[in-house]
Image (cartoon, rainbow, N blue to C red):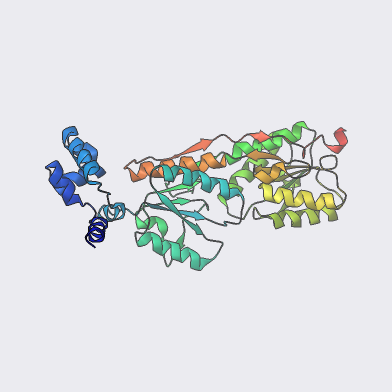
């Protein structure tokens, strides 16, 4: 009985507290806190004593409580327009890798074009439940007359610079990459073009179309002669464009779809009807998603550095949380990957 009682007493021993550490190190509890949270505010000698005392007592800091006192949640809100778009998966991985390395987690806000969801996340930002925000949707969420940016949180945008917001951004140059697409197709002899657009008013769509029409004009081609189809970056838009293409007598010989999803939807639709790619029509996408390598033929596309986009934006936000006042943004390189879906124009053959 005595032995059992002794074991119970040992197992019930209380955990060491910050007061135990302070007493052993001969410093105040405030010094212990500063040594852990802001080591530059204490002397090397004091911090060494604190660390020795922590090791001796087995003290484990209460991170949650410390974050609460510092008014930090250690969480970042990542706003995504549609989580069903595969493009965002690797961007989110890049964000998470960078945040985790700094002790942060993330909350994914999937707006999915639902106003009630947008209102919920605007409220979350104003409630102080996150420390910062990363935006992938090309606009600042708003609800009930409030913009998320009014919550006073550090913010950064990914894939697009939001005009007039003043927010730092990480993106590729949509205008220059589209010019590269036109130059590639023109060099193959194509003169009749089709264009599958992104959502009306979307900043990426605006830049990609501007680069496209500018490049055509510079080559002496009429942008008004292009066949334009509406789109939303998703697969079905490409399918719809493909069906319309099949009904036309004067078909374009080269199609530029401003997302891989739409390019793949278009290509699968027309090939199922007997159209040969690239012998009858060449197709270029945008994004460089994994699926673009596994369709037949493989898809020529602009490869966005998705992991780097996410990681760079997360790093930019962490710098802002640390007090950085960075303005402007960063453009990352996005190469044109020439694959099996583009070839010489039919007449050039």
For the N terminus, the quadrant is bottom left
Q: Nearer the viewer, residue 123 or 13?
A: 13
Residue 292 placement (x, y as % from top left): 70, 44
Residue 303 in view in this figure: yes
Residue 94 placement (x, y as % from top left): 51, 43
Residue 160 in view in this figure: no
To which quarter of the image does residue 243 belong?
Answer: bottom right
Q: Is residue 34 left or right of residue 147?
A: left
Residue drawn at x 84%, y 52% is: 272
To which quarter of the image does residue 214 belong?
Answer: top right
Residue drawn at x 39%, y 43% is: 102
Q: Residue furthest front?
A: 1
For the C terminus, the quadrant is top right
Q: Nearer the viewer, residue 197 or 84?
A: 84
Q: Residue furthest top?
A: 187
Residue 137 in the image: above or below residue 117? above
Count the marks. Answer: 0
Q: Is residue 297 left or right of residue 203?
A: right
Residue 257 placement (x, y as % from top left): 70, 47
Residue 204 placement (x, y as % from top left): 58, 47
Residue drawn at x 85%, y 44% is: 276
Q: Is residue 325 left or right of residue 90?
A: left
């Amino acid at each position: 009985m005595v032995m059992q009682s002794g074991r119970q007493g040992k197992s019930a021993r209380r955990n060491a507290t910050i007061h135990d550490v302070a007493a052993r190190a001969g410093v105040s509890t405030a010094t212990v806190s500063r040594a852990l949270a802001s080591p530059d505010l204490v002397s090397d000698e004091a911090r060494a004593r604190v660390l020795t005392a922590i090791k001796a007592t087995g003290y484990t800091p209460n991170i949650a409580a410390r974050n609460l006192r510092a008014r930090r949640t250690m969480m970042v809100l990542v706003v995504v327009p549609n989580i069903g778009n595969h493009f965002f998966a690797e961007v989110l991985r890049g964000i998470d890798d960078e945040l985790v390395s700094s002790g942060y987690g993330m909350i994914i806000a999937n707006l999915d074009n639902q106003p009630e969801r947008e209102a919920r996340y605007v409220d979350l930002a104003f409630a102080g439940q996150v420390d910062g925000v990363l935006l992938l949707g090309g606009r600042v969420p708003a609800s009930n007359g409030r913009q998320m940016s009014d919550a006073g949180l550090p913010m950064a945008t990914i894939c697009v610079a939001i005009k007039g917001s003043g927010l730092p951004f990480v993106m590729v140059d949509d205008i220059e990459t589209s010019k590269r697409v036109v130059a590639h197709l023109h060099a193959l002899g194509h003169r009749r073009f089709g264009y599958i657009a992104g959502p009306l008013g979307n900043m990426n769509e605006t830049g990609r179309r501007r680069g496209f029409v500018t490049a055509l004009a510079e080559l002496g081609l009429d942008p008004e002669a292009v066949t334009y189809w509406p789109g939303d970056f998703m697969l079905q838009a490409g399918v719809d464009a493909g069906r319309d293409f099949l009904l036309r007598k004067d078909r374009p010989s080269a199609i530029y779809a401003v997302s891989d999803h739409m390019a793949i939807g278009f290509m699968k639709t027309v090939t199922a009807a007997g159209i040969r790619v690239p012998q009858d029509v060449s197709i270029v996408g945008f994004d460089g998603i994994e699926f673009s390598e596994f369709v037949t033929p493989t898809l020529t596309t602009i490869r966005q550095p998705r992991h780097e986009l996410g990681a760079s934006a997360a790093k930019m936000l962490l710098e802002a949380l640390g007090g950085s006042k960075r303005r402007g943004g960063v453009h990352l390189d996005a190469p044109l990957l020439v694959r099996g879906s583009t070839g010489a124009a039919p007449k050039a053959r």
